[in-house]
Image (cartoon, rainbow, N blue to C red):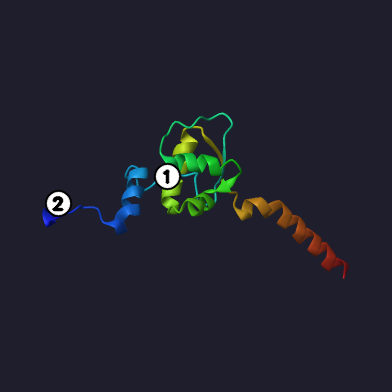
Amino acid sequence: MNDSEESWYDEDAGPVVRLYAVTRGRAGTRRTDVDMVTRVVTSSFGRLRRHEPEYAAIVELARSPLSVAEIAARLHLPITAAKILVGDLIGDGVLDFRAPVSSDEANAPDDLNVLRAVLKGIQRL
């Protein structure tokens, strides 16, 4: 093969090209409710309409609840790409999701009860 026939493809760039193709050139998602700790699970009502293997792999993995970060790690995808693909599947109704609850919101009533119990214990001393 001479220089004019040499392929433009660089083996080192293979995953980058694949990633660009999978996300259709998108660098982010419009969904603000999907974070790396968002848990997703395959919906019993949705039907996979996308043909890319990454979407099918996500649906298969999400048969049991997983975070977006876990999906990214298992599929060897950057977290941004996983968020894009998961966001697509949520939009299609294929995945159900639960956004993370901040620790302040989750523990506020319990923390207050613990503090009251500590205060009562100190007052008894």
The residue that mark 1 highlights is 84
Q: Report the residue that reaches farthest toward the bottom.
A: 125
Q: Height in image: 57 above or below 9?
A: above
Which mark, by number, is residue 96? Answer: none
- Amino acid type, mark 2: Glu
The residue located at (54%, 41%) in the rendering is: 60
Residue 106, x across and y down, in percent:
66, 51
Residue 124, x across and y down, in percent:
88, 67
Residue 87, x across and y down, in percent:
46, 41
Q: Are marks 1 and 2 in contact (CB under 8 Å)?
A: no
* Element on which disc 2 rests: helix
The residue located at (53%, 30%) in the rendering is: 46
Looking at the image, is mark 1 or mark 2 nearer the viewer? 2
Rate crowding at label 2 as few (under 14), some (14 to 19) or many (20 or more) other CA atoms within 10 Å. few
The residue that mark 2 highlights is 5
Of 74 and 97, which appears nearest the observer?
74
- Amino acid type, mark 1: Ile
Quick one: label 1 or label 2, which is nearer the N terminus? 2
Apparent side of residue 31 relative to residue 15 in the rendered image (left or right) = right
Q: Height in image: 5 above or below 47?
A: below
Apparent side of residue 44 relative to residue 89 in the rendered image (left or right) = right
The residue located at (32%, 53%) in the rendering is: 14
Of 3 and 35, which appears nearest the observer?
3
The residue located at (32%, 45%) in the rendering is: 25
The quadrant the N terminus occupies is: bottom left
Rate crowding at label 1 as few (under 14), some (14 to 19) or many (20 or more) other CA atoms within 10 Å. many
* Element on which disc 1 rests: helix
Report, in whole angstroms, how far the alpha carbon at label 1 lies from the one at label 2: 36 Å
Of 18 and 110, which appears nearest the observer?
18
